[in-house]
Amino acid sequence: MAAAAALLPAALSLSPVVAAAEPAPSAPSTTSRAALPDHQLTGYWQNFVNNAPPLRVSDIPSNYDLVALAFAQSDPTAAGAVTFGVDSGLSSALGGYTDADLKADIAAKQAAGTDFVLSIGGAKGSVDLSSASNVTRFVDSVSKIINDYGLDGVDIDIEHGLDVDGVTSAVRQLHQRFGDDFVLTMAPQTLHVQPGGSYLQLIKNVQDIITVVHTQYYNSGSMLGCNGNVHSQGSVDFITAQACILLRTLRPDQVSLGLPATPSAAGSGYVAPSVITSALDCLAAATRCGQYVPERPTPTISGVMTWSINWDVGSGNAFSDPIRAHLDSL
C-alpha cells in the first residue's frame, strides 16, 4: 500500500526487474466468491492522519463496494497477535471520533450494501506468523476484531516478511471459523506476483477461498508481463500484461486492478482514470488495448482497488466517480 502514516516509496526498486518464464498454471478455483457486486470498487480507509483529508467511515462515498480498514497493528505483548481501534491522532482530527462511532458507521454502511475487511500490514506494518502458536494468536485476535466491529473478512497486505505457510494456515483457519461468506482479499506488490514470487505461491495455496486479489500496479519497477515483454508502470500494458499472470491461476472475478487515487497518493505509478478504464476494457472485451492483447476476453473481471478513499475524497471523487460509472457499464 502507499504509506501507513506518510507517503513512503514501496520496498521495490525502481530499476527494471526481469523474471523467469511463467510455469504451467494450476487450475483456477471453482468455489463461488462472497456476495459482492459483479464489478466492484475497493478502497482503503486511512485509520491515521497524513496529507489526505481525515474521514469518518460515514464520509465514504457510495461509489465503494468494499472498504479495507487500514491497518491492524502488531500487538507488542503477544507475537502474532494484532490490535485495532480508532487511531488517537485521527480521533482528534475528527473532533473525537470513537470506536463506538466507527462501529456504528460500519453497521450503517453495511446496511446500505458496503462490505468491510480488516487490512493486515501496509508499508510500515508486519506480523510474525512463523510458528503455529503465533498463527493461533493471530487467528484469535483477528476473529475478536471481526466480531467486535462486525466485519466481513480480512485483507492481506503484508509487504515485509511474508511467511507463506503461516499466512496460508491463518486464512484457512479464519475461513473455517467464519464460513463461506468470509471475504478474503490480498494486495500484493508487483514483484511478489511475478513467477516465483511469495504472494503468487500464497495465492495458489488458497485460491479456492480468495474473494479478490488487487495487485498494486504502482510504486514499482519495470515488470515482466505474461507476454514475455518487460513493461514500465504508467501504461495500459503494465496493468493488463501483469493481470494476465493472475488470470492463469484465478477466476477473472477474483482479479482486480490496484491503482492510486491521485498523484500524491503514491510515490509513482499514478495513471488517469481513462488508462484504468482502458485496461478494464482490454481485459473484459479485448478492446482499447496497448501492445498486449489478451487471447480471450474475461468479461467477469472483478474491478478496481484504490489507495486510498481519503485521497479520492480530497480530489472531489475524481477517481471513484469515473471508475464507478465504468464498472457499472461493464
Image (cartoon, rainbow, N blue to C red):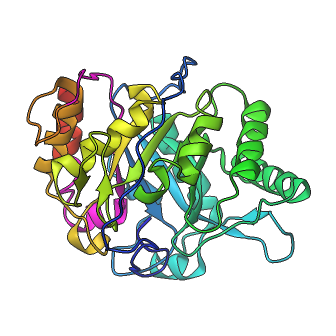
Q: Where is residue 93 drawn, in percent x and y?
A: 46, 81
Left or right side of 215 for 278: left
Does residue 318 appear in the picture of this structure?
Answer: yes
Q: Is residue 65 above or below residue 162?
A: above
Q: Nearer the viewer, residue 20 or 293?
A: 20
Left or right side of 147 for 101: left
Residue occupying image coordinates x 11% and y 48%: 274
Residue occupying image coordinates x 20% and y 66%: 315
Outermost residue toward the right?
133
Q: Quadrant of the N terminus?
A: bottom left
Q: Where is residue 55 drawn, in percent x and y?
A: 41, 66
Left or right side of 240 for 167: right
Q: Where is residue 242 drawn, in percent x and y?
A: 33, 45
Residue occupying image coordinates x 49% and y 56%: 192
Bounds of the magenta span?
294-321
Q: Where is residue 132 drawn, in percent x and y?
A: 89, 53
Q: Quadrant of residue 219?
A: bottom left
